[in-house]
Image (spheres, rainbow, N blue to C red):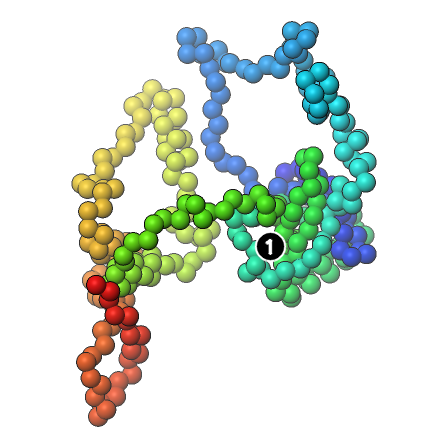
Amino acid sequence: MPRPVWSGAISFGLVTIPIKVTAATENHSIRFHQYHLEDMARVRTRKICEIEDREVYQDEIGKGYEIAKDQVIAITDDDLYDMPLPTAKAIEIVAFVPYESIDPIQIGEGYYLEVDGQVATKPYVLLRQALERNAKAAIAKFAWHGRERLGLLRVIEGVIALHAMKWPDEIRSPQELTPKQVDITDKEIDEAILLIDSMTRDEPIADAVWATDRYTDALSDLIEAKAHGKKPPKATPDEPGAGKVVDLMSALEQSVQKAKESRGGGDADVHELQPKKRTAKKTPAKKTTAKKAPAKKPRSA
């Protein structure tokens, strides 16, 4: 288990819950170092003092804020810890809001909150069960890395998790990126919906076959091949016409067919998902158990 990145408490009204914060995610990306190509010696970044013109070490480096070219205010860790701010030492729950009111683009990295001591167990479990039975999200404030941040508390498999969030004014407006209006036919929309249906999966993402990092796997194969003096694998050529959409409707139909084939289905399955057409007249003498598709809007010229 990774080491805690922060220790403090959850402030829930007048209830205080001592906790330890642990990162909920880990990075599996392959990292590279920089090397001098001539002799393959490691290239390192050194921190140099501009006045003394020498390398300085981490214990000689502190934080500072430049208020003028020749004036810097030193800020110590003790200064930050002793600020008169409740969230400097606690994750303070400030409100509960409906989950659907939270824009996913605001949600950032996640952390697990662990009880810190036996005395914290009961209030921790109490808050966890209250969150599980409530259909709302807990919004909190906390101060890390020199700034106050917004957070979301939720329960994951019996553990309270904290998600860092962006402040509302940190979210850029997408209005200027909205594409221009174009004409889309009902048939194209129906085919796009059919493609979505054919690509829909019921299994969790963690169990899905496609939930793998192909880039990291390919990079591992490349490194292993070169380490053993073998030729690295080459990329397969693209299919004819790949990436070029000439006919949108044709591309949709071919995509639906490929999606169905990848799931082991044939043409029959594809036709079953296609919207049923309405007949010109209803026949009152016969009844059918099949559900009728909703009437389509008249196609514009």
Residue 95 in picture, x, y percent from top left: 69, 57
Image position of 145 (left or right of 256): right
Viewer-nearest residue: 55 or 267: 55
Residue 49 in picture, x, y percent from top left: 66, 11
Q: Residue beneath label 1, please?
A: 156
Viewer-nearest residue: 70 or 193: 70
Looking at the rendered structure, the number of numbered marks drawn on it comes to 1
Q: Give me the residue at 71% from left, 59% from top.
A: 127
Quadrant placement of the C terminus: bottom left
Quadrant placement of the N terminus: top right
Image position of 24 (left or right of 81): left
Q: Give me the residue at 70% from left, 20% from top.
A: 68
Residue 198 visible in the displayed image:
no
Q: Give me the residue at 62% from left, 41% from top.
A: 23
Image position of 173 (left or right of 217): right
Residue 270, picture quadrant: bottom left
Q: For mark 1, does the 10 Å Cα neighbourhood hold few (<14), some (14 to 19), or many (20 or more) residues?
A: few
Viewer-nearest residue: 300 or 18: 300
Residue 24, picture quadrant: top right
Residue 195 in picture, x, y percent from top left: 30, 58
Image position of 12 (left or right of 32): right
- The three-letter code of the residue at mark 1 reads Ile
Viewer-nearest residue: 4 or 229: 4
Q: Give me the residue at 78% from left, 45% from top.
A: 86
Residue 197 in picture, x, y percent from top left: 33, 61
Above-or-below relation of 221 to 185: above
Residue 72, picture quadrant: top right
Element marked by disc 1 = strand
Residue 170 visible in the displayed image:
yes
